[in-house]
Image (cartoon, rainbow, N blue to C red):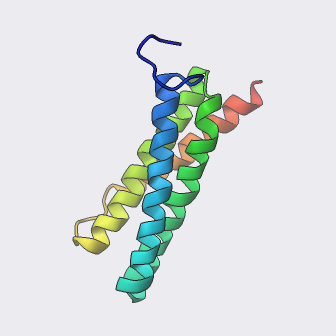
Amino acid sequence: MHATSSAPGMPRPQRWLAAAGAVCAAAAVALSAYAAHASEGPAQARLQAAAVFAFGHGLALVLLAPATCRRLRRCALLALALGLLLFCGSVVSGVLAQWPTTLAPLGGMLLIGGWLLLALDLSRR
């Protein structure tokens, strides 16, 4: 453990990934409530889909980050975190601010790639 670490037992990158996952899960709950009470039609469906992705992937980051000691798994989880940010962020900003959702496909590809990297890492044990 590094001298700058403050949480016992978990190095800094793992703590950051787990914390980011927890924030994503919390944001997903808030986004789902917003979608249910302040939107309707296609916008509601898009926001709910983003909430489902944010919650599922946030939970995955929380659960998988503490066991991340190999470089390939860290890369997989970083791809999941970045993909989650780009995909959900693009969908939500498209609904709420009418911004283009051009980053959503890249985010989706990063999510797919992250899961495939994780599968590769798990199969190499």
Q: Is residue 121 left or right of residue 125?
A: left
Instruction: Give how far across and how far down residue 11 sits, in percent.
Output: 52, 22
Residue 34 image point, x, y percent = 39, 76
Going 52% across and 30% down the picture, which residue do you hit?
Answer: 14
Q: Compare residues 123 and 26 and report the one nearer the observer.
A: 26
Give percent across and percent down for residue 94.
Answer: 29, 69
Seen in the picture, residue 14 relative to 100 is either above or below; the reply is above
Percent coordinates x, y for residue 90 in the rendering: 33, 60
Answer whether residue 92 is visible to the viewer in this image. Answer: yes
Relative to 80, say whether 51 is above or below: below
How many marks can you see?
0
Location of the C terminus by quadrant is: top right
* 68 to 37, vertically: above or below: above
Depth check: 106 or 2 in front? 2
Q: Please tell me in which quadrant of the rendered image residue 73 appears.
A: top right
Q: Residue at x 50, y 47 (%)?
A: 21
